[in-house]
Image (cartoon, grey):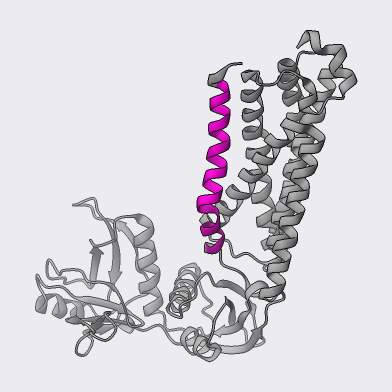
Amino acid sequence: MKWGRLLAFLVMVAAVLGLTVSTGPKIWKSIPLGLDLKGGVDLLYAVDTPKGHPLDSTGKAALVRAIEMRVNSLGVSSPIIQLEGRNQLGQDQIRVEVAGVKNQQEAVNVIGATAQLAIYGSAKIDPKTGKIVPVGPPLATGADLKSNAHWVVDQQTGQNAVAIEFKNASLWTSITKRYLQKPIYVFLNGQLLTNPVVEQVMYTGQSEISGGNLNTPQACMDLANELNAGALPYPLTLESETSVGPTLGAASLQRTLLAGVIAVVLIFAFMMAAYRMAGLIADVALVAYGYLTLLTFAGLHVVLTLSGLAALILGVGIAVDANIITYERIKDEVRNGRSLRSAVRIGNKNAFRTIVDSNATTFIAGLIMYIFGGEGDVRGFAVALMVSIIVSLLTAVLFARAMLLTFTAAQAVKNPWWYGAPRGVVKSREAKV
């Protein structure tokens, strides 16, 4: 027995199980649930743009960002915001789905409110809420800004910054003269965005905001969208409001999850019964698949819906299928008279192309569903399916293969029966192992 290889195998197993047990529940709780699992409100708004001036890409990004900020202020997050077609009046429409909202009317009022941008010369901390609030009348509002804020890199300092421009250059000149070497406070919908210090008098109406947390291009683009949202003169008109109950209530969701756990346990038992030690290794790879899939969902801020949950469970079957193909190839090589280590190596190699081909066709189907399926559940299922396929390839093909080769090299067991081979084949080939 090669103890170093065996130790490496045990470390891989311990890492998977340890991470899953210690951080898995937290990751699961961090994934937001969609309307069909949690319930909420479905709102359709018309964007009141001037006639003949539909929303451009900048206006759309600013509007989406503004709605995200308003939803976050309700104490919920991860809204589904979809720009749709136009109504009978030729107005652009935007749909907002918010899961888990407790006060539906508050959501309607907050989301539909016109974004209010204001610049103040003073602010203080509210002793009741602890938040920074403005003091006195605003020096300027979003109506005074052009909707062209964008990310730039300061030519002198090399810092990331946000470029803004006032409609009336003299207004900005008077503000910068008055608050030279002093901070000003930029608020959007009552929330402090930034409080830059005025370093020089501006005469052209153009300026840059830098410092604070504006240290990355993404942070600057987010702030630019927020500023454009504040300056955007497009109010929203509520066209439809639907209270959505969860397709699966809390009790039903728990029963569904319990059924999923039972199914996974049965799969684990089948793999161990059919392929013994190799099946146990496949089970560990399945645990890694589940953990990495949830981690990917959380990292991509995927909102989990019934269709996404179905794709996640389907991915378990895809991952199991990849392991079964590999183990059957290994059994074939054992029957052909190869040693155990050689059978494992060649069996993995021969199974690789079959696994990739079968997963590629499924991935292409998911991609087509994503492109042509429109918005909503179809796209949600397609995204979850494609993520599941990629993760299953990483775990079933790469990670499971690495564990299997490492365990075989350790020579902890030398009988091919532990890899699913029939006993009769084992007796005739034992001398060649």
Q: Residue at x 71, y 62 (%)?
A: 258
Q: Quadrant of residue 390?
A: top right
Q: Is residue 368 visible?
A: no
Residue 209 picture location, percent across and down: 25, 65
Q: Is residue 430 visible?
A: yes
Up-down: is 181 above or below 43? above
Q: Nearer the viewer, residue 157 or 310?
A: 310
Is residue 233 one of those drawn in magenta? Answer: no
Up-down: is 403 above or below 263? above
Quarter of the image for the C terminus: give it.
top right
Most frequent secondary structure within the magenta stretch: helix
Q: Residue at x 69, y 70 (%)?
A: 253
In the image, farthest residue toward the right: 424
Residue 259 picture location, percent across and down: 75, 61
Up-down: is 257 above or below 270? below
Is residue 9 one of those drawn in magenta? Answer: yes
Residue 42 picture location, percent across and down: 62, 81
Q: Residue at x 49, y 75 (%)?
A: 76
Horizontally, residue 141 falls left or right of residue 52, namely left
Q: Nearer the viewer, residue 237 or 11?
A: 11
- Image mark count: 0
User: Which range is magenta?
Assistant: 5-29
Residue 23 picture location, percent across and down: 50, 52
Quarter of the image for the N terminus: give it.
top right
Q: Quadrant of residue 347?
A: top right
Horizontally, residue 205 falls left or right of residue 64, namely left
Up-down: is 427 above or below 390? above
Horizontally, residue 409 falls left or right of residue 268, namely left
